């Protein structure tokens, strides 16, 4: 087990599934019986045992993809509220070990903003997680801005999590190889493209000019964007572009986590581009197991003080834990 540098370990992208919500999923997004399914529905047994074995003190729990982003408007609000209430009840016996991100009914954006306020103010949740486009619409669309306005007002972050790419995108980009490499449209590449595109579109949309204190979290060491921030910023500054600084917005308003990307070179790139204070520890449990994440942290070529910021200090500040 990793010898922690005199600090707790807080993992902030750790998932579960709600049975009622998961029953709405179809096709490749539907769950299958097995060990992963068992972990996704567990709160007090194997989840805690595997946290203890790895040395993880706290999980910030969020629903797995696609969460509530594909629910229709006619039942999204009521179902999402039940999902959040059940999550609050599930973590209540172990508040020292668990916190939560809310699911939001994005099909009804004003209600989603109200649900963000309810879950943070009444249930003690630490923000919300949104998964990919909402019913096929990118989250930069102005119809969703009430959610971002409320997040800024409440001073809580929105975590942008991947979901399956659009079916037509999958057909054109990935289907040639999906039979032999089924993850190519998912964590190997498709998830990254979808989520990075959403993040770039948010910056271009002007939402941060309207809401300059809005905080956005990206997993997987920023979905490649820290590696590309110089080029994106330089290209957007060429003649003929609307005046803006992609770098200033990205490196100020975005935070990134280590979920499912345990690479020293990638982490050091992120530190150099964004600063260590914008990086938070996460595993992506149960889709990724705890031990590789903790074992990797022992190899990270940073000071103990910087490791402590990543492992818990930054999460404590950002999420007010």
Image (cartoon, rainbow, N blue to C red):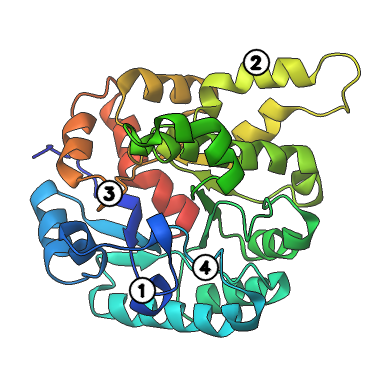
Who is closer to the viewer here, 159 or 105? 105
Dot 3 or dot 4, earlier in sequence = 4
Dot 3 or dot 1, earlier in sequence = 1
Q: Are marks 2 and 1 in contact (CB under 8 Å)?
A: no
Q: Marks 2 and 3: which is nearer the front?
A: 3
Query: Could you give the CA–CA distance between mark 3 and mark 1, rounded to whole angstroms?
Result: 16 Å
Q: Residue furthest right?
A: 240
Query: Could you give the CA–CA distance between mark 3 and mark 4, rounded to whole angstroms?
Result: 19 Å
Element marked by disc 3: loop
Q: Residue at x 18, y 36 (%)?
A: 292
* Residue 231 badge: 2
Q: Are marks 3 and 4 in contact (CB under 8 Å)?
A: no
- For disc 3, the marked residue is 287
Residue 306 location, quadrant = top left
Q: Position of residue 212 (x, y in %)?
A: 74, 47
Q: Residue at x 66, y 51 (%)?
A: 214
Callout 2 crowding tier (Cα within 10 Å): few <14, some 14–19, many ≥20: few
| Horizontal arrangement in the rendering, residue 32 relative to residue 13 (left or right) | left
Q: In which quadrant of the rendered image does the N terminus lie? A: top left
* Residue 68 badge: 4
Callout 1 crowding tier (Cα within 10 Å): few <14, some 14–19, many ≥20: some
Q: Are marks 2 and 4 in contact (CB under 8 Å)?
A: no
Query: Could you give the CA–CA distance between mark 2 and mark 1, rounded to whole angstroms?
Result: 40 Å
Who is closer to the viewer here, 212 or 192? 192
Q: Position of residue 278 (x, y in %)?
A: 49, 37
Q: Residue at x 24, y 65 (%)?
A: 97
Residue 173 location, quadrant = top right
| Horizontal arrangement in the rendering, residue 80 relative to residue 42 (left or right) | right
* Residue 18 badge: 1
Q: Is residue 310 visible?
A: yes
Q: Is residue 292 above or below residue 290?
A: above
Q: Residue at x 59, y 76 (%)?
A: 115
């Amino acid at each position: 087990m990793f010898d922690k540098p005199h600090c707790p370990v807080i993992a902030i992208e750790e998932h579960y599934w709600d049975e009622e919500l998961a029953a709405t999923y179809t096709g490749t997004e539907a769950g299958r019986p097995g060990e992963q399914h068992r972990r996704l529905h567990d709160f007090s047994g194997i989840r805690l045992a595997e946290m203890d074995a790895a040395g993880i003190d706290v999980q910030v729990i969020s629903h797995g993809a696609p969460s509530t982003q594909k629910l229709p408007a006619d039942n999204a609000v009521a179902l999402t509220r039940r999902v959040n209430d059940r999550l609050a009840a599930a973590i209540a016996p172990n508040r020292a070990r668990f916190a939560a991100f809310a699911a939001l009914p994005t099909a009804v954006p004003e209600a989603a903003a109200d649900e963000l306020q309810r879950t943070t103010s009444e249930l003690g949740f630490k923000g919300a997680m949104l998964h990919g486009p909402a019913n096929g619409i990118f989250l930069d669309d102005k119809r969703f801005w009430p959610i971002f306005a409320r997040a800024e007002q409440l001073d809580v972050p929105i975590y942008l999590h991947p979901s399956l790419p659009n079916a037509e995108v999958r057909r054109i980009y990935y289907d040639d190889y999906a039979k032999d490499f089924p993850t190519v449209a998912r964590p190997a590449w498709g998830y990254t493209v979808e989520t990075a595109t959403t993040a770039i579109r948010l910056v271009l949309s002007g939402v941060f000019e309207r809401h300059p204190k809005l905080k956005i979290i990206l997993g997987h060491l920023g979905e490649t964007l820290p590696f590309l921030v110089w080029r994106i910023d330089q290209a957007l500054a060429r003649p003929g572009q609307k005046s803006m600084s992609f770098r200033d917005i990205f490196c100020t308003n975005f935070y990134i986590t280590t979920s499912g990307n345990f690479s020293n070179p990638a982490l050091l790139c992120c530190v150099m581009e964004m600063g260590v204070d914008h990086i938070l520890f996460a595993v992506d449990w149960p889709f990724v197991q705890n031990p590789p994440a903790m074992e990797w942290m022992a190899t990270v070529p940073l000071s103990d003080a910087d490791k402590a910021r990543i492992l818990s200090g930054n999460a404590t500040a950002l999420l007010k834990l």
